[in-house]
Image (tube, helix red, strand yellow):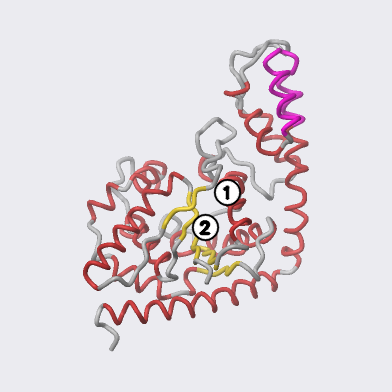
């Protein structure tokens, strides 16, 4: 039997190149190898978007279109909506007894995200909600309710997966060895930098190229990308290793082109404006096939809805079977 993979994406906006190179390329390879469950995590998106439910609802469908457009096959991948699987919420409650508040507060990923959301949770996290602090518990329920063995993650998500394993070990020590400890699957590109040089491309950071961006939008964003600050004149030599334009050339261009850009940049034979214009064209050509496939789903919303309904039904069946075992072990199978 194929091993089970579980991964999820929060529907807070369209996918960007960070998602594509950091995770989605891996999904394309794995869909042929595993029993693949892909969660559209609307409940977890509400932990920091609770005041904008309409945004989350809209993006459930937007993000699904993006995933289908990159080439994920609904015959191989079970797309499902988190809120359609009540067993996840039920298991989250059970797990909440197995992890302390202080442990959740120490989680590096949680601490980092609280720091990025000062407007919502206060400068020192004094307004953090119970739901947001506890979302690693919900993620543990996501994984284990499907008996997930492998989880594709970026390196910034590893603390969350370790917390899941801690919960699994605690559960098994009390109720018997029912749950599997999930293992990570790291992408070869675990994190994609932003156009501003930030170590992470992110929706909230305003430094991302989205899969749906048109040519005009790409032009505006790339023309503002960070380059070597020491390069003042067109014929000044520069260091491509600190230039975000060269960084993106490496993602979307051929090896020969990348080598040419690097050599010319170091020798002062390439101006930044020329380099940015070439990147804009390359990036646009890279995104065109994705955007063309996406247009089909934009014109056939009923297909997207059916994919989510069918995937959620299959996910519900799997979760129901797993919860039966869990409740028997916990002596609450009345």
Quadrant in the picture for residue 247:
top right
Q: Start and end of the magenta stretch?
A: 255-278
Element at label 1? helix
The label shown at residue 305 is none
Circle 1 crowding by C-alpha within 10 Å: few under 14, some 14–19, many from 20: many
The label shown at residue 19 is 1
Q: Is residue 53 magenta?
A: no
Q: Is residue 104 left or right of residue 295?
A: left
Q: Between 94 and 25, which is closer to the camera in this rendering?
A: 25
Q: Image point 21% across, 70% down: which residue?
A: 174
Which residue reaches farthest front? Answer: 1
Q: Where residue 137 appears, x then y in whole percent?
A: 34, 61
Q: Image point 69% across, 73% down: which residue?
A: 302
Quadrant in the picture for residue 96:
bottom left
Q: Quadrant of the C terminus?
A: bottom left
Look at the numbered discs 1 and 2 and tell me whether their residues touch, using CB distance below 8 Å.
yes
Instruction: Examine the residues drawn in magenta and state their main secondary structure.
Output: helix
Mark toward the start of the polypeptide (1 vs 2): 2
Q: Image point 45% across, 56% down: which residue?
A: 49
Element at label 2? strand
Q: Between 239 and 116, which is closer to the camera in this rendering?
A: 239
Task: Tell me the distance, in whole angstroms, between the alpha carbons under discs 1 and 2.
Answer: 9 Å
List the residue tagged with mark 2.
9
Q: Image point 61% across, 29% down: which residue?
A: 244
Q: Where residue 280 appears, x then y in whole percent?
A: 74, 35
- Vertical placement of residue 332 versus 73, above or below: below
């Amino acid at each position: 039997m194929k091993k089970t993979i579980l991964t999820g994406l929060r529907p807070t906006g369209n996918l960007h190149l960070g998602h594509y190179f950091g995770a989605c390329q891996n999904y394309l390879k794995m869909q042929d190898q595993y029993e693949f469950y892909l969660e559209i995590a609307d409940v977890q998106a509400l932990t920091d978007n609770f005041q904008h439910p309409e945004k989350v609802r809209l993006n459930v469908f937007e993000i699904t279109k993006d995933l289908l457009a990159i080439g994920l096959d609904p015959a191989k991948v079970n797309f499902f909506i988190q809120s359609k699987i009540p067993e996840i919420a039920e298991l989250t409650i059970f797990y909440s007894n197995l992890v302390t508040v202080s442990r959740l507060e120490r989680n590096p990923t949680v601490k980092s995200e609280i720091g990025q959301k000062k407007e919502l949770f206060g400068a020192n996290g004094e307004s953090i909600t119970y739901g947001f602090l506890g979302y690693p518990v919900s993620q543990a329920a996501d994984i284990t309710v499907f008996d997930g063995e492998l989880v594709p993650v970026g390196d910034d998500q590893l603390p969350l997966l370790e917390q899941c394993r801690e919960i699994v070990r605690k559960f098994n020590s009390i109720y018997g060895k029912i749950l599997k400890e999930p293992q990570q699957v790291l992408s070869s590109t675990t994190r994609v930098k932003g156009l501003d040089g930030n170590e992470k491309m992110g929706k909230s950071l305003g430094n991302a190229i989205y899969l749906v961006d048109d040519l005009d939008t790409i032009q505006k964003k790339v023309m503002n990308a960070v380059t070597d600050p020491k390069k003042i004149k067109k014929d000044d030599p520069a260091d491509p290793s600190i230039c975000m334009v060269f960084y993106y050339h490496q993602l979307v261009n051929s090896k020969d082109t990348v080598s040419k850009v690097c050599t010319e940049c170091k020798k002062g034979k390439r101006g930044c404006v020329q380099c940015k214009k070439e990147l804009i064209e390359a990036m646009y050509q890279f995104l065109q096939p994705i955007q063309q496939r996406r247009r089909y789903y934009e014109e056939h919303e009923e297909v997207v809805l059916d994919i989510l309904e069918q995937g959620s039904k299959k996910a519900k069946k799997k979760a129901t079977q797993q919860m039966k075992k869990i409740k028997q072990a916990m002596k609450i199978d009345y």
